[in-house]
Image (tube, helix red, strand yellow):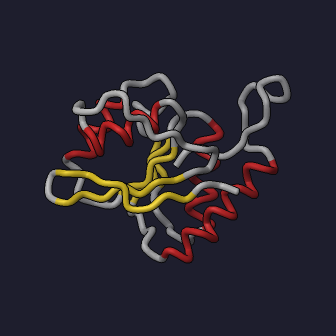
């Protein structure tokens, strides 16, 4: 999931979520509840405030009671291959709240590996995609865009 809308740097350099961002997460939670299969056991987030706040609202809005974990390697300019390697050996359902362009590159890497380097999955603010593994291959299961 990409973080929701945040206030501008001029308003607050920490860039917490805006009211619009909070509303985006609430609407995404409504859509996810209708899907009925979003049940991560952990939510990983970047160190940036807008990512942590989005993760917290997602956890509360979905009534997950999942641990929120600050995970290195999820900032916008980090190498997505590092997280892809970690996810490759992960057997649990994990939610990741992060940033573009990192998430788009990560999703593409998980699904296509290095075979299609030009493919990119753009994430809208508060957009979320579910990836699932079939054997060693990953594929996209569903996508929810924020309104």
Task: Name the residue furthest right.
Answer: 11
Q: Is residue 16 left or right of residue 81?
A: right
| Residue 67 image offset from top left, x and y in percent | 45, 57
Residue drawn at (38%, 34%) of the image: 119
The foreground one among 146 and 91 is 146
| Residue 68 image offset from top left, x and y in percent | 49, 52
| Residue 115 image offset from top left, x and y in percent | 22, 32
135 to 80, vertically: above or below: below
Q: Is residue 138 left or right of residue 6?
A: left
Toward which corner of the image does residue 139 lie, by quadrant? bottom left
| Residue 142 image offset from top left, x and y in percent | 44, 61
The foreground one among 73 and 88 is 88
The foreground one among 143 and 95 is 143
11 to 38, vertically: above or below: above
Residue drawn at (51%, 37%) of the image: 46
Residue drawn at (46%, 38%) of the image: 103
Q: How many marks?
A: 0
Q: Is residue 26 left or right of residue 8?
A: left
The C terminus: image quadrant: bottom right
147 to 97, vertically: above or below: below
125 to 36, vertically: above or below: above
Q: Is residue 82 left or right of residue 70?
A: left
Toward which corner of the image does residue 41 lie, by quadrant? bottom left
Residue drawn at (46%, 32%) of the image: 102
């Amino acid at each position: 999931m990409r973080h929701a809308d945040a206030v501008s740097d001029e308003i607050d350099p920490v860039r917490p979520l805006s009211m619009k961002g909070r509303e985006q997460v609430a609407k995404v939670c409504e859509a996810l509840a209708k899907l009925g299969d979003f049940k991560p056991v952990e939510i990983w987030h970047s160190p940036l405030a807008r990512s942590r706040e989005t993760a917290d609202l997602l956890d509360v809005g979905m009534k997950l009671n999942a641990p929120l974990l600050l995970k290195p390697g999820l900032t916008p300019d980090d190498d997505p291959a590092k997280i892809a390697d970690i996810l490759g050996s992960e057997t649990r359902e994990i939610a990741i709240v992060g940033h573009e362009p990192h998430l788009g590159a990560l999703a593409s890497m998980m699904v296509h590996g290095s075979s299609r380097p030009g493919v990119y999955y753009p994430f809208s603010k508060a957009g979320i995609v579910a990836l699932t593994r079939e054997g060693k291959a990953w594929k996209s299961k569903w996508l929810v865009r924020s309104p």
